[in-house]
Image (cartoon, rainbow, N blue to C red):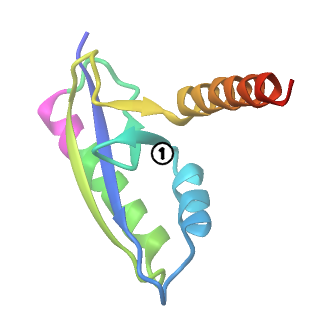
């Protein structure tokens, strides 16, 4: 069951839109923020895409991204490829969970040193 993902890298410009504005727009398009070599991923739902389907999907998502980010003064890069199951990214939810565990561990260390 091959599944394609489109990965996006965003380069921000200090005179352009804020990262939170860009993130909001990308979330509206169905992208997920991730940790890794790319900033966001879009997971294509069709597991049995033909080359024609894939080409159409890439054009559709590229056009939507271009229209959405027009005027935001950001650069972006797209890469669409097969998801290999051992993806080179971690969803933001996983990152948030890791951060919460780290915060709790730090609080415990701080409490121990106060004793």
- The reply, left or right, for residue 2 in relation to residue 64 is left
Residue at x 52% of width, y 51% of height: 29
Give coordinates of residue 62: x percent, y percent: 31, 58
Residue at image position (30%, 34%) is 5
Residue 106 versus residue 25 in the image, above or below: above
As rendered, which of 46 and 86 lies closer to the eye?
Answer: 86
The secondary structure making up most of the magenta span is helix
Give SS at disc 1: loop
Image coordinates of residue 69 in percent, x first then y, are 45, 72
Residue 82 location in percent, x, y? 20, 27
Q: Position of residue 7 (x, y in %)?
A: 31, 45
Quadrant including the N terminus: top left
* Of residues 73 and 115, the one drawn nearer to the viewer in this rendering: 115
How many residues crowd mark 1 within 10 Å: few (<14), some (14–19), many (20+)?
many
Residue, x 40% and y 62% (percent of image)? 65
Q: Residue furthest front?
A: 115
What segment carries the magenta color?
50-55
Q: Quadrant of residue 54?
A: top left
Closest to the observer: 90 or 51? Answer: 90
Disc 1 designates what residue? 31
Tell whether position 75 is magenta: no
Name the outermost residue toward the right.
Answer: 115
Q: Residue at position x 18%, y 44% from top?
A: 55
Q: Nearer the viewer, residue 18 or 66?
A: 18
């Amino acid at each position: 069951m091959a599944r394609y993902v489109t990965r996006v890298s965003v380069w921000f410009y200090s005179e352009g839109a804020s990262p939170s504005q860009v993130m909001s727009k990308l979330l509206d398009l169905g992208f997920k923020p991730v940790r890794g070599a790319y900033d966001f991923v879009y997971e294509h739902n069709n597991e049995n895409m033909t080359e024609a389907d894939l080409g159409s999907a890439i054009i559709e998502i590229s056009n939507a991204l271009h229209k959405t980010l027009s005027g935001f003064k950001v650069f972006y890069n797209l890469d669409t490829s097969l998801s290999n199951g051992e993806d080179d990214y971690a969803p933001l939810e996983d990152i948030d969970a890791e951060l919460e565990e780290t915060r709790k561990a730090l609080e415990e260390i701080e409490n121990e040193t106060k004793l």
